[in-house]
Amino acid sequence: MRPLSPSFLSSRATPLAEAETVRLTSRHLRAGLTGPLTEAARWGAVPLPIGRFSLHEIHTKRDIPLLHTWMNDPAVARWWELDGDEEVVRRHLATQAVRTHSNCYLGCVDDEPVSYWELYRADLDELARHYPAHPHDVGIHLLLGPAAWRGRGIGSLLLRAVTELVLRAAPDTARVVAEPDVRNTASVAAFERAGFRRAADVELPDKTAALMMRHRPARGTGARP
């Protein structure tokens, strides 16, 4: 299946170059609280039915206008609450940048930006106060930006791909977790299709969340991470 090409994306300036593919060995994993999550832009491109998917670092001057467009889509703003002028997005990215356990990326298909990702150490996050966190749990936030890419099963496809990349890159991580709003049934369903299970509902300061978990398969099962 050929990737979708919404017109406003196709006309966007300079596509992002595909990241060089690297072997994910301990030599490439940066030390620190975030460990391998800081290296996601170097994980390379993954072939998927919709095209080659890769993660790229956020460059604020280049990417804030696009993220601002996505965040002001009413279907997105309902859940992310980052609508408004570009300064709202800028402040959010600045907050993420100073956190020692969280990293932000653009997700691209054939170099077209189609998604925004936050990968973070859930055991070092405020979330850990609300569930029995394990060391090195990794959390995922995903925004599928262009409306034409939603409602087609692409979100679950990308979630599965990124989860497998995380588990491959981070050998100490046994679980990937997420906490979509329980009212966001489309998001909950996307995580379920990506191999996550709904472990519990938890009360967070700003929402009731469905705690979604995907465990690393046991050795010898023959399954991919």
Image: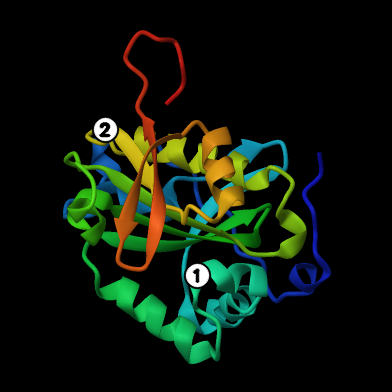
The label nearer to you, 1 versus 2, is 1
Check the picture and name the quadrant holding the C terminus.
Answer: top left
Element class at badge 1: helix
Element class at badge 2: loop
What number of labels is visible? 2
Q: Residue at x 48, y 52 (%)?
A: 182
Q: Residue at x 55, y 76 (%)?
A: 63
Does 203 sit above or below residue 71? Answer: above
Residue 14 in sight here: yes
Residue 56 place in picture, x, y as percent: 49, 60
* Crowd class of label 1 (few under 14; some 14 to 19; many from 20; radius 10 Å): few
Say which residue label 2 marks: 171
Q: Nearer the viewer, residue 24 or 205?
A: 205
Residue 38 in sight here: no
Residue type at mark 2: give it.
Answer: Pro
Q: Nearer the viewer, residue 75 or 87?
A: 75
Does 116 sit above or below residue 187? Answer: below
Q: Nearer the viewer, residue 14 or 127?
A: 127
Using the rendered view, name the quadrant where residue 107 is placed.
bottom right
Do residues under tags 1 and 2 come within 8 Å of each other at their CB atoms? no
Residue 51 place in picture, x, y as percent: 70, 44
Residue type at mark 1: give it.
Answer: Trp
The earlier-in-sequence mark between 1 and 2 is 1
Measure the alpha-carbon separation of dots 1 and 2.
30 Å
Q: Residue at x 59, y 41 (%)?
A: 156
Say which residue label 1 marks: 80
Q: Residue at x 17, y 51 (%)?
A: 31
Does 182 sit above or below residue 170? Answer: below
Residue 149 placement, left or right of 41: right
Q: How is the image coloured?
A: rainbow
